[in-house]
Image (spheres, helix red, strand yellow):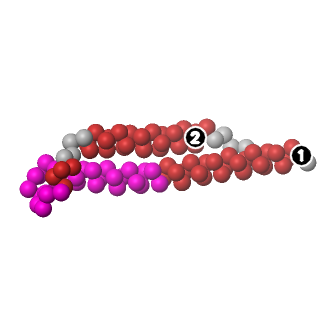
Amino acid sequence: MNIDLMPFAVIGGLLVLAVVVLILYRRSIAQKEDDTIHVLEDATKVPEQVEVAARLDKVDRVGKIVTVVAVVYMLFLAALFVYQQWARQSSTVM
């Protein structure tokens, strides 16, 4: 079994790039957040901060999903690569 893994590696690279972009996007949103407001009793009086918190929650949810998909995909790709090398090695020994 000899499969060209390059297209799969490109897809994995795009998934990793998506995770990095989400990290940078979350960081840019978090710069607008005022952490001192969260210690107040009623932080809902500041609608801008409520909106920022909602956007951060949404980005966090998507980020977790994309990160898990990227990790599982890359582990599968690594396992496929190792199996392919093992199969190639065992066929040349005989």
Judge from the rendering whether residue 49 lies leftward or rightward of residue 31; answer left or right: left
Judge from the rendering whether residue 8 lies leftward or rightward of residue 64; answer left or right: right
Q: Name the secondary structure under disc 2.
A: helix
Q: Residues within 10 Å of mark 1 (few under 14, many from 20)?
A: few
**Residue 76 location in percent, x, y?**
60, 52
Residue bearing mark 1: 93
Residue 52 visible to an observer of this rendering: no
Identify which residue is drawn at 70% across, 48% down: 82
Q: Mark 1 belongs to which amino acid?
A: Val
Q: Is 48 part of what is drawn in magenta?
A: yes
Considering only vertical position in the picture, is 20 above or below 50? above
Front position in the image: 48 or 13: 48
Judged by its main secondary structure, the magenta piece is helix
Front position in the image: 7 or 71: 71
Of label 2 and label 1, which has the lower sequence position? 2
Judge from the rendering whether residue 10 lies leftward or rightward of residue 60; answer left or right: right
**Residue 93 location in percent, x, y?**
89, 46
What is the residue that sits farthest to the left in this orientation? 45
The residue segment tinted magenta is 39-68
What is the residue that sits farthest to the bottom in this orientation? 41
Q: Mark 2 belongs to which amino acid?
A: Ala
> Whole-Å distance between the Cαs marked 2 and 1?
28 Å
Q: Which of the 4 image quarters holds residue 28?
A: top left
Residue 9 visible to an observer of this rendering: yes
Front position in the image: 89 or 67: 67
Q: Is 17 part of what is drawn in magenta?
A: no
**Residue 25 location in percent, x, y?**
32, 41
Q: Residues within 10 Å of mark 2 (few under 14, many from 20)?
A: some
Residue bearing mark 2: 9
Judge from the rendering whether residue 42 lies leftward or rightward of residue 1; answer left or right: left
